[in-house]
């Protein structure tokens, strides 16, 4: 092998080594960029998980408040019903003032 051919082979090998080094550096840069993107996406997932947990807690609180309001409404209705029954019982007592008024008429008037 002549000296010129040896120089050409060495030169070709140097180009291949430079290309390999360039490829490795490019791949490292891409890896770092992808790792940064993965970290950002993981952070987004954590933030969304926290938001979901917050919304689930709020939903639970709202359900509890709704149930308490429903129970309070039932108690209020029961109290009103009791008062109405007491009034109707008072109207039905024979005291001479409700003469000529039947129980059905009192119920009809109370419902209206």
Image (spheres, rainbow, N blue to C red):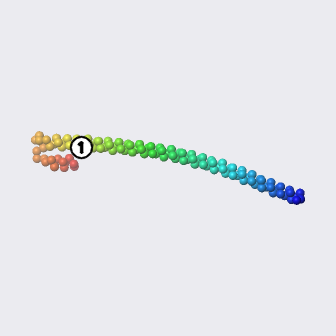
- Describe residue 5's horizontal placement relative to residue 85 as left or right: right
Residue positioned most to the right: 2
Which residue was labeled with disc 1? 81
- Describe residue 25's horizontal placement relative to residue 11 as left or right: left
Q: Residue at coordinates 86% horizontally, 56% vertically from top-left?
A: 7
Q: Residue at coordinates 62% horizontally, 47% vertically from top-left?
A: 36
Q: Residue at coordinates 48% horizontally, 44% vertically from top-left?
A: 53
User: Horizontal and vertical percent for residue 86?
Assistant: 20, 41
**Badge 1: how crowded within 10 Å, few (<14), some, or many (20+)?**
few
Q: Residue at coordinates 60% horizontally, 49% vertically from top-left?
A: 38
User: Horizontal and vertical percent for residue 5?
Assistant: 86, 59
Quadrant in the picture for residue 8? bottom right
- Along the line of sight, which residue is nearer the eye, 96 or 35? 35
User: Horizontal and vertical percent for residue 63?
Assistant: 39, 45
Can you say whether 11 is above or below 40 in the image? below
- Describe residue 59's horizontal placement relative to residue 82 as left or right: right
Q: Mark 1: which secondary structure?
A: helix
Number of callouts: 1
Q: Quadrant of the N terminus?
A: bottom right
- Along the line of sight, which residue is nearer the eye, 22 or 10? 10
User: Horizontal and vertical percent for residue 56?
Assistant: 45, 45
Residue positioned most to the front: 1
């Amino acid at each position: 092998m002549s000296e010129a051919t040896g120089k050409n082979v060495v030169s070709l090998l140097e180009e291949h080594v430079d290309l390999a080094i360039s490829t490795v550096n490019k791949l490292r840069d891409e890896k770092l960029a992808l790792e940064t993107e993965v970290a950002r996406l993981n952070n987004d997932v954590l933030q969304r998980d926290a938001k979901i947990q917050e919304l689930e807690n709020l939903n639970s609180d709202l359900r509890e408040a709704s149930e308490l309001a429903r129970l309070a409404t039932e108690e209020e209705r029961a109290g009103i019903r009791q008062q109405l029954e007491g009034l109707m019982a008072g109207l039905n007592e024979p005291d001479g003032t409700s003469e000529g008024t039947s129980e059905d008429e009192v119920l009809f008037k109370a419902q209206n």
